Amino acid sequence: MDRTFVICKPDAVERGLVGEIIDRFERKGLSLVAGELRAIDEATARRHYAEHDGKPFFADLVSFITRGPSFLLVLEGPEETWKVVRTLMGTTNPREAAPGTIRGDLGILLTENLVHGSDSPEAAERETALFFPALHV
């Protein structure tokens, strides 16, 4: 089985959408391996978004993800789970995301786009190790 990492961001938690988001993943056939409601501290946020450090939006990204609790989860599927999750999420900009996707149906703002999903097997491994070290083998 293949695993990937997902964050239901603070806006998803604030809007009460975590259950619907998880439901979409489960209806697709993915299994929830781990999940936790957690406030992400600034140091962890900076490590998580390290590839964006130095970009104009980095400070806003860190500020947003640390403003309130997020629901962190690890999902499992038969293969290329990260790709399945990214497809279900829709494009980063909710105004351009296709209907039927999480962002297309539920999102409005680029800066508050509800979910983060690993963008490669390597990112899934790194992010899972960062947030759920006991799962990382």
Image: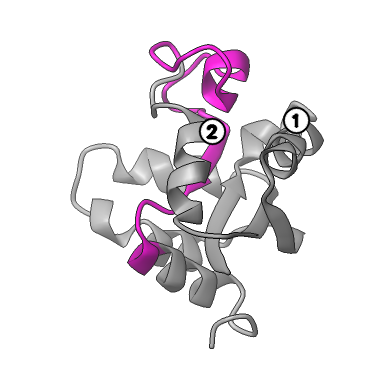
Magenta stretch secondary structure, dominant: loop
Q: Which region is colored magenta?
A: 95-123
User: In this picture, is 136 found above or below 124?
Assistant: below
Q: Residue at x 38, y 64 (%)?
A: 121
Q: Looking at the rendered structure, which numbered label has been put on residue 17?
A: 1
User: In this picture, is 96 found above or below 67?
Assistant: above
Secondary element type, mark 2: helix
Q: Position of residue 32 (x, y in %)?
A: 73, 58
**In screen coordinates, is 25 left or right of 125?**
right
Answer whether residue 38 is visible to the viewer in this image.
no
Q: Residue at x 59, y 26 (%)?
A: 102
Marks 1/2 in contact by CB < 8 Å: the verdict is no
User: In this picture, is 135 found above or below 19?
Assistant: below
- Between marks 1 and 2 in the image, the one whose residue lies nearer the viewer: 2
User: In this picture, is 39 found above or below 107?
Assistant: below
Q: Identify which amino acid the numbered label 1 is placed on.
A: Leu
User: Where does label 2 land, which residue?
Assistant: 88
Q: Position of residue 73 (x, y in %)?
A: 66, 57
Characterize the local packing of mark 1: few (<14), some (14-19) or many (20 or more) Cα atoms within 10 angstroms.
some
* Residue 13 figure quarter: top right
Residue 96 colored magenta? yes
Q: Residue at x 48, y 18 (%)?
A: 109
Secondary element type, mark 1: loop
Q: Residue at x 75, y 30 (%)?
A: 17
Mark toward the start of the polypeptide (1 vs 2): 1
Q: Position of residue 72 (x, y in %)?
A: 65, 56
Answer whether residue 30 is visible to the viewer in this image.
yes
Q: Looking at the rendered structure, which numbered label has been put on residue 7?
A: none
Please identify the quadrant where the N terminus is shown: bottom right
Q: Identify which amino acid the numbered label 2 is placed on.
A: Leu
Snapshot colouring: one colour
